[in-house]
Image (cartoon, helix red, strand yellow):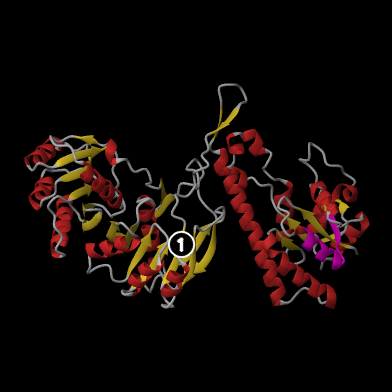
Amino acid sequence: MQKAALLSVSDRTGLVEFAQALHDCGYVLLATSGTTKFLGEHGVATLPIEEYTGQKEILDGRVKTLHPKIHAGLLAKRDNPEHLQQLAAEGIMLIDVAVVNLYPFIQNLNSANAQTPAKMIELIDVGGPTMIRAAAKNHKFVLPVIDPADYAAAAVYLRAHALNGSPIDSVADLELRRALAAKVFTRIANYDLEIAKYLTHVHIGDKAGEALAEVSATDEFMMGETAGMVLSRVQELRYGENPHQKATLYRNLSSTSPGWEQLNGKELSYNNLLDFDAALRLIRSLGSQEPCACIIKHLNPCGAARGSSLLVALQRAKSGDPRSHFGGILAFNQSVTADVARDIREDFAEIVLAPDFEPEALTILKTSKNLRILKVSIAAPAKRRFDVRVIEGGVLMQEEDARLSDVREAKAVSSRSPREEELHDLDFAWKVCAQVKSNSIVLVRNQTLIGTGAGQMSRIDSVELAISKARLHGHDLQGAVCASDAFFPFADSVETLGAAGIRAIVAPGGAKRDDETIAAANASQIALIFTADRHFRH
């Protein structure tokens, strides 16, 4: 019985070479009209599906592969004589390979088409998922190939069996087929999920029958009636937060890029990845115009500074808490130079991340084979991220806290307004504070983090902790500034800050005792400004 390969693709990457390999293996190439035209232009002969089935494409191409000759060829059990007899009686070929990928619905979620549901509806594939679902169900006999990245391996596999005529029934054979089938069902699940999420944001407009979409191309995924992700494993981690916990790194199947590249060092651990993410959030929020360095330990910054150069910024960041930076995660907002690399190598660091590394700097850093070096994009991602946390009985999802107000637009509520140099430090403190675990208090002087109070049960505890750490390391608090991630419930925090020498504070307003807080600021000649936003990090 004649064997066939089915080709129906929207992504034509590597198709010509793979189609030629299939032809060389003796397969009749059944192809849809667009694929037939493309392959014909490249000298590869095909049998158009409509010629094979005797049914022309109808309904503007909505129906072209939904035919018994296609699905019987995919679904027939090759070890069932009755199935084979029925195919022979109906003149149906066995379709042993299905090379199919789906209409680009997901890719168009980031295009202008997403605002027009009528256009998006036409990008919902029906025949494609039906064919690859059938092929994947019958993967013992049919090879489902949906990803151009798998063409080369599939060609090698098919050529080997075509040349020696061996039956496809070994453990290795079936494992390959199982893996390709699993990829099919994963892709279909993700495809259908993205369609469902999109449709929950479509509503009927004022005009009868007019559909409108409330879709933002900046959303990683949309929080509507349906939400979620299909996750693809990137790597298994040695363990989680603790050695007795299993852990794995997954990536959203709809994501196009991880946003970072590891250039050197051991594999990243669960805790490394959390700290890396915290460092990236902070360095992104500080911008890229002025050289900046930050140091993360246990998800909190223990050092952060700007400077006239990246080296100065790093040295200032280390000076902020010289006892804690050892073994930290170092993040930079500009390309790492050789002098910075030499300074890094003088101490122990777990990770160094930056938008780039000069060749000499990279050579110096790589002298430590274990040092993890990550090249990252400092620019804010095009899509907003969402934070996801699992709780008993459900999943919490929230938009990433990335909307930080400008301190220059904050409301001055004290008798004295902040001076220009104080505003500059307040801006830096406010951005750092938003990345510290609440209750969060940070102290800054001359664009350098000199004291941090994080994760305390009361705000005054955080104030006292930040002041004590600054004094422990010999920092001058006279003229320093403070940022608080939420309002002061009582005046005691401002009184304590004033007594320590703090001269400007930025904090959200809205407490019942704001008047008492303002009075305490005035008594200490503190410039106090209130923002409209708060930045808890639980």
Count the marks. 1
- Residue nearest the viewer, comparing 114 with 136: 114
| Residue 153 x/y as whole percent | 71, 69
Q: Judge whether residue 26 is colored magenta.
A: yes
Q: What element carries label 1?
A: loop
Residue 184 seen in this snapshot: yes
Where 359 falls versus 407 (above or below)?
below
Q: In which quarter of the image is the N terminus?
A: bottom right
Q: Dot 1 surroundings within 10 Å: few (below 14), some, or many (20 or more)?
A: some
Amino acid identity at mark 1: Asp
Compared across the picture, whether 280 is left or right of 67 comes to left
Residue drawn at (67%, 63%) of the image:
149
Residue 42, placed above or below residue 140: above
> Residue shown at 14%/46% (left/top)?
503
Nearest to the observer: residue 345 or residue 512:
345
- The residue wearing badge 1 is 356
Residue 497 is situated, as x and y percent measured from the top left of the image, at 12, 49
Task: Give residue 319's position: percent from left, percent from top.
Answer: 23, 64
